[in-house]
């Protein structure tokens, strides 16, 4: 049996971050993913921008 595809895992991570109501947690998760792999998770940068726009 094969595991989940990389695209499916990434889509789930994106969904979880997008649905997180706590801005600090969303920011932390985005930072973590970007440190892990800045190219693979480049989409997470938009969540850092949104929180910094809110003064965090």
Image: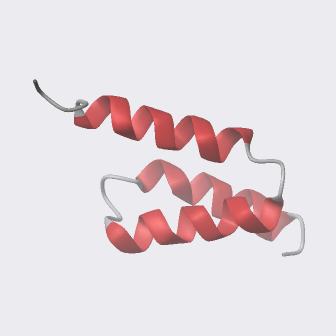
- Residue at the far top in the pictured view: 1
Residue at point 25%, 31% (across, down): 4
The total of numbered circles placed on residues is 0
Residue at point 67%, 41% (across, down): 18
Res 47 → quadrant: bottom right
Instruction: Report the quarter where the C terminus lies.
Output: bottom right
Reply above or below: 2 against 27. Answer: above
Side of 14 relative to 22 (left or right): left
Side of 31 relative to 49 (left or right): left
Side of 14 relative to 23 (left or right): left
Reply above or below: 30 against 14. Answer: below
- Residue at the far right in the pictured view: 55
Closest to the observer, 3 or 18: 3
- Residue at the far left in the pictured view: 1
Residue 42 locus on image (x, y percent): 42, 54
Which color scheme did the rendering employ for the protein? secondary structure
Residue 29 locus on image (x, y percent): 58, 63
Res 45 → quadrant: bottom right
Residue 28 locus on image (x, y percent): 63, 70
Residue at point 48%, 35% (across, down): 12
Reply above or below: 30 against 15. Answer: below
Instruction: Report the quarter where the N terminus lies.
Output: top left
Residue at point 36%, 37% (across, down): 9
């Amino acid at each position: 049996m094969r595991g989940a595809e990389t695209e499916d895992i990434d889509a789930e991570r994106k969904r979880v971050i997008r649905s997180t109501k706590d801005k600090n947690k969303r920011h932390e998760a985005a930072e973590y993913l970007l440190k892990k792999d800045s190219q693979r998770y480049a989409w997470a940068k938009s969540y850092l921008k949104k929180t910094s726009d809110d003064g965090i």
